[in-house]
Amino acid sequence: MSDITANSASGAPRKGSLLVQDGRTQRRNAAERRFQIYGMIAVSVAVLALIFLLTSIVRNGIGAFSQTFITLDVVLAEDKLDKTGNRDRDEMAKVSTFGYAPLITAAIEDRIAAEGIEIEGLSKPVDLISKQAAADLRDFVLANTDRVGETVEFQFLASGRIDGYYKGRVTMASAELDSNVTPQQLMLADALKDTGALERTFNWGFITSPDASENRPEASGLGVAILGSLYMMIVVLVLALPIGVAASIYLEEFAPKNRLTDLIEVNISNLAAVPSIVFGILGLAIFINFAGLPQSAPIVGGLVLTLMTLPTIIIATRASLKSVPPSIREAALGVGASKMQTVFHHVLPLAAPGILTGTIIGLAQALGETAPLLLIGMVAFVREYPGAPPEGFFDPASALPVQIYNWTTRSDPAFVERASGAIIVLLVFLLLMNLIAIILRRRFERRW
Amino acid sequence: MNDIKISASGVDVFYGDTHAIKNVSVEIEGNTVTAFIGPSGCGKSTFLRCLNRMNDTIDIARVTGSILLDGEDIYDAKVDPVQLRAKVGMVFQKPNPFPKSIYDNIAYGPRIHGLARNKAELDEIVEKSLRRGAIWEEVKDRLDQPGTGLSGGQQQRLCIARAIATEPEVLLMDEPCSALDPIATAQVEELIDELRQQYSVVIVTHSMQQAARVSQKTAFFHLGDLVEYGETGHIFTNPEDSRTESYITGRIG
Ligand SMILES: Nc1ncnc2c1ncn2[C@@H]1O[C@H](COP(=O)(O)OP(=O)(O)OP(=O)(O)O)[C@@H](O)[C@H]1O
Ligand SMILES: [Mg+2]
């Protein structure tokens, strides 16, 4: 309207061919093209940064999913493992891992002799095998007492240095200076590899095993951390979703608009911006010191993360409730629906996709949260799997991001690879959650 | 002379500081079609929305004065607006079908008010309402498709059908024909005339011809004032107020 009046103010109507752009149009189109180029540059920078980040994580971490194993025939000597000979499990449990170590030493030395491998200056060939091996063998024997006396083929984890040798972390030169491994042992590893006793395969243990101590990185896994994170997510979902949605519905649809609700609103927005470590301190004070819940337990972690997630869910839910057009509410009220019927029959279904997205974003945030968990003791070294829910919620456990943090603080370089591997696992979980969010959203949106 | 269905006296409406309705008193009769006319922004919709307390949903809106439905004050603290709105149905100025199927759009009201005992009865109500809303022929084969997928005029008729499905005693219609072609308009006007046998209908319209055709009573609003109210024939042929006259003549030409 105003364009036309501005042009016709001079009195002359517009003239000129449509096939030739006038100066004004050219300038406008140039500005549009410029803006598109800025946008494309911004997107490219973001994508490149992402690609760089992902490739570096994958390159560092992919190794954690494969592991070097040494397969040996072990003689389960009865006179060492079961002196009484009656296969009584409790009796046999008295033999500690120290009792099993000689069996492994014998097994590898037999193998070397059998293959006729001779290496000048080779000492302690058993160092090729993880210190975890004796414990693994003991677990196997106690679980299969009837196998005592037999010779069984057993797959042992290779020690971290040998594994590192095949992943390029350890070289002959570095082994020279390393007190944990000698070049001769590396040569032995190569010789065993040629015979097929040593091989690198997919490492389920990385996903299922519990954490292991500082000097046996090869045995460490994410089992306890994944369970702990899963339990916490369950707690967060079960608590935060209903509380958050109910609170939002009340605030948005029912609560009178006055000073008090304004105050609550402002504070919810503020809570969303509170640093997460503050929630950790709060959790420590309230749930552990005051309520007496156990430390390192997923229930406490879940409660703390619930507090942290609530503002996210409430804000997202309120935004999606607000975005439902008021005409829908009027339509429902107009045919005589009550306020609650209006909300639950019409408003909530329309807001559901937004609520779901908000919830899953909140959950994803909670899944990756580390700081508050450090304060409530989730950083403890936990080797026992937590029990099945609901009791399991009170057992000590770790969490994925805390495990990552934990591994990055350890000195053995093998843990760098473990930490990157754990980040990959965490990212896969986040991707899965986003996928679920998208699928759920599709499903809800199909109902208009 | 019909009995008084709705009696409003001394009604004022404020939106915050805006004084949208100024001391309006009007008596709406049963079995009558009452037309509200007036220039845009004069408060027709606002006053209409007072009659079923739809203004309750606007936070800044404040209504004073008294409005009686069958002698009972609808703004009494004991009145549940939900019950009131089941009696006083409304068709909104902008078509607002639910984002559900055409069937569910109509069936929703009867369902929540328990008007149908079984599926067959509900089907019957849906068909009857759609027929009366002059839209049955167009949608009978696609009842399971979304109501939001209809054209603007179809949506408007769907909303009319939805409003009469709950069998209200008073039907408030805010420009129900603004997006309709002459054929559908004629059908809706026929419906309005038919509804008059049982209910009272209040209709807001910008079409003088329509007001003259369908209504028995006409109220002319101007800047929040009720300028003139009376027999439609009288208002159109012999307006007492000069504002009414200039509005009517200006429009009709
Ligand atoms: N929700 C609201 N908030 C604030 N002011 C409003 C609101 N609704 C209406 N008003 C004001 O009240 C006055 C009357 O509005 P109303 O919608 O009743 O007019 P109308 O007669 O229906 O006009 P139209 O013919 O254009 O529909 C207008 O000045 C308008 O600006
Ligand atoms: Mg209006």
Image: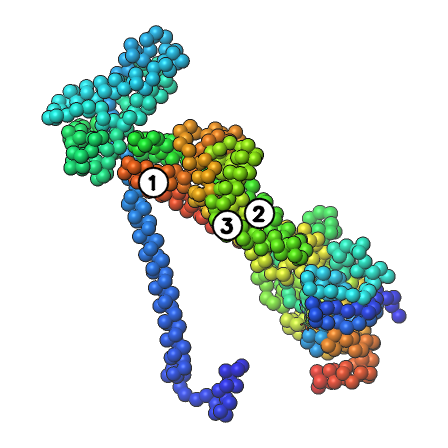
Tell me which numbered mark, 2 or 3, is placed earlier along the sequence: 2
Tell me which numbered mark, 3 or 1, is placed earlier along the sequence: 3
For the C terminus of chain A, the image quarter is bottom right
Type of residue at label 2?
A: Gly
The quarter of the image that holds ligand 2 is bottom right
Please give the residue where the numbered disc 1 appears in the rendered image: A408
Q: Position of residue B246 (x, y in %)?
A: 74, 85
Q: Position of residue A416 (x, y in %)?
A: 30, 40
Type of residue at label 1?
A: Thr
Quarter-wise, where is residue B64 in the image? bottom right
Q: Position of residue B153 (x, y in %)?
A: 63, 68
- Separation (CA) of disc 2 from disc 3: 17 Å
Type of residue at label 3?
A: Val
Name the disc covering residue A244, or none.
2
Q: Secondary structure at mark 3?
A: loop
Please give the residue where the numbered disc 3 appears in the rendered image: A274
Q: Residue at x 54, y 44 (%)?
A: A307
The answer to the question of whether label 2 and label 3 lie on touching residues, with beta carbons closer than 8 A, is: no
Quarter-wise, where is residue B181 in the image? bottom right
The answer to the question of whether label 3 and label 1 lie on touching residues, with beta carbons closer than 8 A, is: no
Q: Residue at x 87, y 68 (%)?
A: B2
Q: Give me the chain letter of mark 1.
A: A
Q: Label 3: how many residues lie within 10 Å, few (<14), some (14-19) or many (20+)?
A: few
Q: Residue at x 89, y 70 (%)?
A: B1
